[in-house]
Image (tube, rainbow, N blue to C red):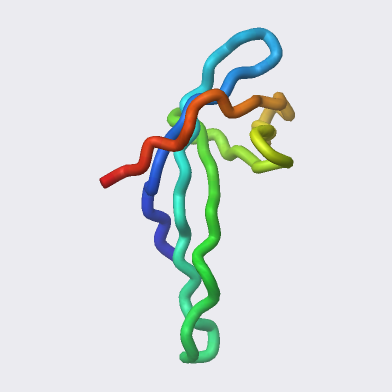
Amino acid sequence: MAAVLVGQFHARDAEGRVYSVHEFKESNPPLDGVAGSAPTTTYKLAIGDRVEKLDGKEFRLIQSGTIITRESETVYAS
């Protein structure tokens, strides 16, 4: 499975800290030789910590459980 960086955005926690979040598309290889399923979107902080998308503009840092809110639109990689 290969992950390709497709964009990034900033999010802020309740204490005002800003996080740089990277958005990846992961290709899912075919399991049975037939075309693979749709790519999966995953999120990570710039420092590598995993991020889980919740509802709307909210995300949760997996390691600490901190809830962050998306502030900026995604800047897409070219």
Residue situated furthest left in the rendering: 78
Image: 75 above or below 13: below
Vertical placement of residue 40 versus 28, above or below = above
Q: Position of residue 68 (x, y in %)?
A: 65, 25
Residue at 53% over, 70% down: 38
Snapshot quadrant of residue 43: top right
- Nearest to the observer: residue 11 or residue 60: 11
Q: Residue furthest top?
A: 15
**Left or right of residue 66: residue 19:** left
Residue 59 on image: x %, y %: 66, 34
Image coords of residue 8 (percent x, y): 42, 36
Looking at the rendered image, the quarter that the N terminus falls into is bottom left
Q: Is residue 27 above or below residue 30?
A: above
Q: Is residue 1 above or below residue 12?
A: below
Give the residue drawn at x 45%, y 49%: 24
Residue drawn where x is 37% and y is 53% of the image: 4
Q: Which image quadrant is residue 31 in? A: bottom right
